[in-house]
Amino acid sequence: MSQCLCHWIGLATRYLITTVSEFSDFIFESLIKILFGKNPVYGQVRKGEESCYQFNFSKIVDSVNIDNLSNQARGNDFDRKQADRDMNTIDCMAEQSRSIYGLSAIVVKVMVMQYVYADHTLREVDKDCWIYKVMKNESNTYFPEASKIYCMLRM
């Protein structure tokens, strides 16, 4: 790709990000993923922030009943009131991670929800390095792609 085309894509990206809705941004970011191979959700994580995302993820996972949320996600019996409280906790804590640490709240929520939907045994193995697992997500089969969770959260 020529430098001129890359320059125009960069200008178009800045323009779109400042003028269109988040969902439209997501569609554009998906196009960037196709063109340049970048993950549209985790592309927002800047180098050096991974440990901060992992810290906030761990705080949230330790504060909610993940098993109950996983049961809900799988269509099994679950406590609806507890699930509602837990989803509110996730929203509040993700927002705190944005306001306190400058992280993307949606990225934090996507990380947590990928963990909720992940295979129970395998997620426990990867819990302490979850940010690195979800950022790589190379043909992973035990948790959903970030873009699918992102779309689900936007509905």
Image: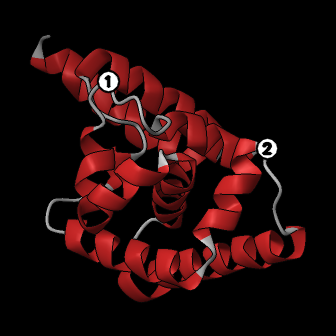
**Label disc, if present, on residue 139 of the rendered structure:** 1
Name the foreground residue: 95 vs 60. Answer: 60
| Residue at the image position 23 percent from the left and 16 percent from the top | 5
Expressed as whole percent of the image width and height from the top left, the position of residue 149 reads 58, 42
Q: Give the residue type that dot 1 points to.
A: Ser
| Residue at the image position 52 percent from the left and 54 percent from the top | 110
Q: Is residue 128 left or right of residue 28?
A: left
Expressed as whole percent of the image width and height from the top left, the position of residue 132 reads 23, 53
Quadrant where the image shows the N terminus: top left
Quadrant where the image shows the C terminus: top right
- Label 1 and label 2: CA atoms lie apart by 25 Å
Do we see residue 71 in this rendering? yes
Counting every numbered tag in the picture gives: 2
Crowding at mark 1 (Cα within 10 Å: few <14, some 14-19, many 20+): few
**Label disc, if present, on residue 22 of the rendered structure:** none
Name the foreground residue: 15 vs 154. Answer: 154
Name the foreground residue: 28 vs 53. Answer: 53
Residue at disc 2, secondary structure? loop
| Residue at the image position 68 percent from the left and 49 percent from the top | 153
Q: Nearer the viewer, mark 1 or mark 2?
A: 2
Expressed as whole percent of the image width and height from the top left, the position of residue 111 reads 45, 57
**Label disc, if present, on residue 75 of the rendered structure:** 2
- Residue 2: name its quadrant: top left
